[in-house]
Amino acid sequence: MKKLECRLPKTKTGHKSFKKIIRAGKFLFAKTGYHSTSVNDIISKAKVAVGTFYIYFDSKLALYMYLLDEYRYNIRQSAHKATLGLEKREDIERAGLKAFIMYVKKDPLAYKLIWESLFVDQEIFRDYYQSFASSYTNRLKPFVENDEVREDIDLETVAYILMGISNFVGLQIVFNQESDESTIDFVVDETMKILKEGMFKKA
């Protein structure tokens, strides 16, 4: 896929316009979908001129890719900050899971915008999750070597399992409008029981 250009603002006025475009694009892509949203819709919502849009983005797709990359970065950063200084893999998984759920609870549009990539371009959708899985797999490897993670399981498969758990447990919280941090802690603890002990009774 051809690299799409995004040019960051250099002035305070430009920064304000850029943020307006970002907010409008995020809202409209999540509400009506990528294909049903036009550049004209975005500039109308953002209240900027069409020329202003093209100062920063080559196209609608360039804006969408910027937003997707922003979510990828922010989600990873929230997990990084939450797990900083932790050494045991179990503690890292718990803190990372909670950080992800807290993030999507605060910004539930993340789900719609990320999953919209499946309808934008399947290659984008695949690359988004493959990059997460690859990074996750690499982070798990040292814990096999120090005997915290089993050596008889495929780490790539484990990475996808853990990503799936995070995604759908996150939805459990997003769907519950009354959920708060104590609810999140409960759900995270219940998830960790499964990860530690497994779902089936031991014979």
Image (spheres, rainbow, N blue to C red):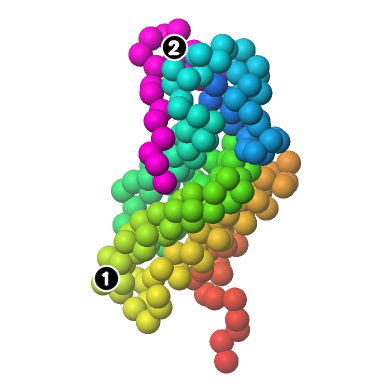
Q: Which of 106 and 95 is in front in this view?
A: 106
Quadrant in the rendering for residue 20: top right
To which residue does mark 2 refer?
14
Indicate the secondary structure of the residue bearing disc 1: loop
Classed neighbour count for the residue bearing mark 2: other residues with Cα under 10 Å, few (<14), some (14–19), many (≥20): some
Residue 33: x, y in percent? Answer: 67, 39
Quadrant in the rendering for residue 148: bottom left
Q: Who's the residue at 44% across and 17% down the image?
A: 55
Q: Who's the residue at 40% across and 54% down the image?
A: 131
Q: Which of 39 and 96 is in front in this view?
A: 39
Residue 30: x, y in percent? Answer: 65, 37
Indicate the secondary structure of the residue bearing disc 2: helix
Q: Who's the residue at 54% across and 76% down the image?
A: 198
Q: Give the range drawn in magenta.
A: 1-20
Identify the disc placed on residue 146.
Answer: 1
- Is the Cβ of the residue at disc 1 closer than 8 Å to that at disc 2? no
Tell me how many marks there are: 2
Please state which of the two labelled residues, at mark 1 or mark 2, is closer to the viewer.
2
Q: What residue type is labelled 1?
A: Asn
Disc with the residue nearer the chain's start (1 vs 2): 2
Up-down relation of residue 26 to residue 187 (above or below): above
Identify the disc placed on residue 114.
Answer: none
Residue 41: x, y in percent? Answer: 66, 23
Residue 90: x, y in percent? Answer: 42, 62
Q: In which quarter of the image is the C terminus?
A: bottom right
Q: Is residue 70 at all visible to an observer of this figure?
A: no
Q: Who's the residue at 49% across and 53% down the image?
A: 123
Q: Which of 93 and 133 is in front in this view?
A: 133
Direction from residue 19 to residue 88 in the image, left or right: left
Q: What residue type is labelled 2?
A: Gly
